[in-house]
Image (spheres, rainbow, N blue to C red):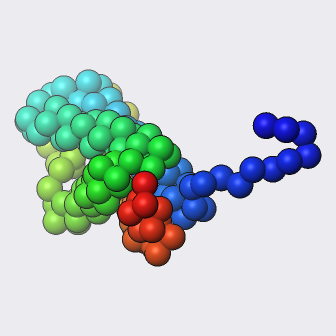
Amino acid sequence: MFPGISVPDRRPRPVAVAFWAQATVAALLVVMAATGVIGALRYPDVSGERPGYPLGAGVLLAGAAGLAAAAAGLRRGNRIAYRLSLAGLTLPVAVLAAGVLGVGVTYESSFGVVAYGDANDLIAWIALSATVTAAASAAATVLAVLAVALLASRPARRFFASG
């Protein structure tokens, strides 16, 4: 505001870091949804056997939109956004748990419907998409746990109780 005079931010540092962690989780959910949609569009014969692609992508995109909207509210100190963030940050953990349990986007070895020339491309895509999804899922889970821990900290609780 004035040169040489710094005005401290009213928002505690844990809330600011939680905002960035939550925004990153939302972006990672979009990456995971895009990976599934790209696979479904590139390999309709294989993915056509699995009607869950659009539903899974829709759930991830809805979760990303909700987390992004709640993150914007966190920056403003909104108590409702605080509660929605705490609830919504469980989504990446649920997605990871579902993946561990075998629910979600997977490719089966049904290469009978894929022409021989496309099989190598499909195998490369499976490896790439599995790597991207696993990395995004792991990072989103770690960031979600970090954000929840920061939002549950005493400075954050006091900030949202007073706001």
Residue 60 found in image quarter: top left
Which residue is most to the bottom?
Answer: 154
Q: Is residue 58 above or below residue 8?
A: above
For the point 23% across and 65% down, which residue is it? 97
Say how many tags the image has. Answer: 0
- Furthest-right residue in this view: 4
Q: Quadrant of residue 29?
A: top left
Is residue 115 something that shows in the picture? no
Comparing 6 with 55, the one in front is 6
**Closer-to-camera residue (26/123):** 26
Identify whether 131 is placed above or below 31: below
Give residue 133's position: percent from left, percent from top: 37, 49
Which residue is rendered at x = 32% and y = 36% of the image? 65
Can residue 6 be seen from the camera position used here?
yes
> Split into 4 quadrants, where in the image is the N terminus?
top right
Q: Please tell me which residue lies in front, 7 or 37.
A: 7
Q: Could you say where residue 27 lies in the image, as x and y percent from the top left?
A: 44, 41
Give the image quarter of residue 102: bottom left
Instruction: Give x and y (percent) for residue 84.
Output: 28, 52
Residue at image coords 39%, 48% = 78
Point 81% across, 50% down: residue: 6
Q: Position of residue 19 (x, y in %)?
A: 49, 51
Left or right side of 42 for 143: right
**Residue in front for this viewpoint, 131 or 57:** 57
Instruction: Classify the position of the C terminus by image quarter.
Output: bottom left
Residue 77 vs 35, above or below: the answer is: below
